[in-house]
Image (cartoon, coloured by chain):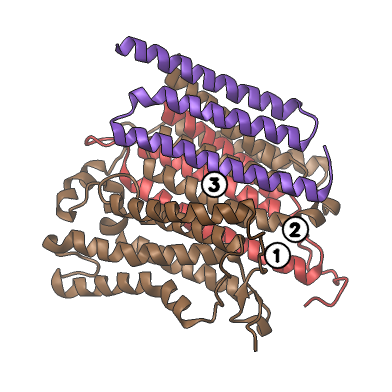
Amino acid sequence: MSAALDILSAVAISAGAFFFLAGTAGLLRFPDSLTRLHALTKADNLGLGLVVLGLLPHAAGPLAALKLIGVWLLAQLAGASVAQLVASAVKARGPET
Amino acid sequence: MSAATLFGLCGAGLVGLGLYGLVVSPAPLRKILSFNLLGGGVFLLFGVVARRGAAAGLGGDPVPQALTITGIVVAFSATALAVALALRLFDATRRPDERADEPSADGGS
Amino acid sequence: MTPDLAIDIGLAVLVLGVAAWTTVVRESFAAVVGFVTYGLLLALAWVRLHAVDVALTEAAIGGGVTGALLLAAAARLGPAEDRTPGDRPGAAPRLLAAVLCALVSAGLGAIVLLPPDPAPTLAPAAVASLPKTGLGNPVTAVLLAYRAWDTFLEKAVLVLALLGVWSLAPDALWGGRPGPAYRAQRDGALALLARVLPPAGIVMGVYMLWTGADEPGGAFPAGTILAAMWILVMRAGLADAPAVGRRSLRVALVAGAVVFLAVGLSGLATAGAFLAYPVRFAKPLIVLIEAPLTFSIAVTLGLLAAGPPERGLPR
């Protein structure tokens, strides 16, 4: 059972790392601010969620697992708000590279 | 090579980088940033001393760690004062460099 | 090479790389963003050095409050700095500076690579007196029991820095409100964040203060988180910055230091020395000091990030 959990953790964390890599590739390769924002927020929210999912079996108890999920929710809240703010600033200033 | 030695070398590198930026950058804001990089390097060196002093069941010597916490807070207050000075200099001279011996374009405020 | 060592090497290289980028990049705004990133990476380095209290403080102050302060400064100073960069030194002085700074780094690196053996440490002494303080976290014990005088002086330094910042206001605006009048959209993303996050942030700050007695945490990270929540609320325009001449604000600023001093002076009567705690009441006295200290730190850090008064009081 614990071997299966370890494999699940490894797969989830690797998938999360892959999404972070994809988000960074989007940040570097996409042409303008809005597309880069899209790449960053989608990849980072999903990537962080997968990493947290992979860490949940190894958490030191249900309270620690809830803290991990709380971290993910707070990171999503901050990321979504900042993405909205950057996007409205881009819209106000006009398109740029 | 242990983590402590590695981060000690990193701290030494940060001190050099921060010192270079402090000396070479002409703009006050960049000098303030480099000063903070320098401070971060010094604190890392403290952290290495703390890590090497791990004993009595602790992960690190608590006295340098407490000194570092104090240092981080005081460095922030120094940064805040420096930023306020830089902003005031900018407002008074309308020019963000530090040569105060030249006459300013407007009369200042 | 173990995975731990690989992570440490990657982290150290990343910290140095981001710091180098911050030093050489052209735009000031980008340099400030690089600096905030450097602060967060440094917090990770502190965790790898088994100093979790320091990591919390570095993440909160280096990544949070300093970021807010420097981003506001870069917004005002940056465009002019980038347009007229002033006179950079020529190639020869820069090379000389680089060589000398490299020598400084090499000297420090040599000190790191040739440590004293056995390493000097005060950890056994710190742990030995821990039961007398009633605390479980040795860093909190150092901050508030063994070296309480340093913590008190640090609080005084914070207030002095704030006085310095306030004194930069023009005479006519003394006692006014710091910073511009922030106005975010009532139903925009920033206002939403400033309504949803502070309740959670306040709970986290108070929890971190309470748990700092036995686990990593303590007054300084807690005060910084509370200050960050206040800065967020002010920047979103949900609450205006208080006028710095208000008596209640000034009482809030000095409350931490005053209570600290009072408990220290009472130690003369009860335990025989300034800032000594009687063993039976050590933990309650420390908590009594920590609560106003955290509140004062939060108010001071928030006002330091807000800057000197820029708007006068309505007459």
Amino acid carrying label 2: it is Leu
Which residue is outermost to the front? C187
Task: From the image, tell me which residue sits under label 1.
Answer: B87
Please say if the residues under marks 1 and 2 sit with CB atoms less than 8 Å apart. Answer: yes
Chain C: drawing colour: brown
Judged left or right of residue C47, residue B31 is right
| Front one among C286 and A27 | A27
User: Does residue C309 sit above or below A48 in this rendering?
Assistant: below
Which residue is at 61% across, 60% downward? C236
The x and y percentages for residue A23 are: 64, 27
Which residue is at 57% across, 28% downward? C13
Letter of the chain in red: B
Can I make out residue A76 in this image?
Answer: yes
Q: Secondary structure at mark 3?
A: helix
Chain hosting mark 2: C
The x and y percentages for residue C59 are: 49, 45
Question: Which mark, by number, is residue C63?
Answer: 3
Question: Which mark, by number, is residue C77?
Answer: 2
How many neighbours does mark 3 have within 10 angstroms: few (below 14), some (14-19), or many (20 or more)? Answer: many
Which residue is at 47% across, 36% downward? A72
Letter of the chain in purple: A
Query: What is the C-alpha distance between the residues marked 1 and 2?
Result: 7 Å
Can I make out residue B59 in this image?
Answer: no
| Front one among C212 and B63 | C212
Query: What is the C-alpha distance between the residues marked 1 and 3?
Result: 21 Å
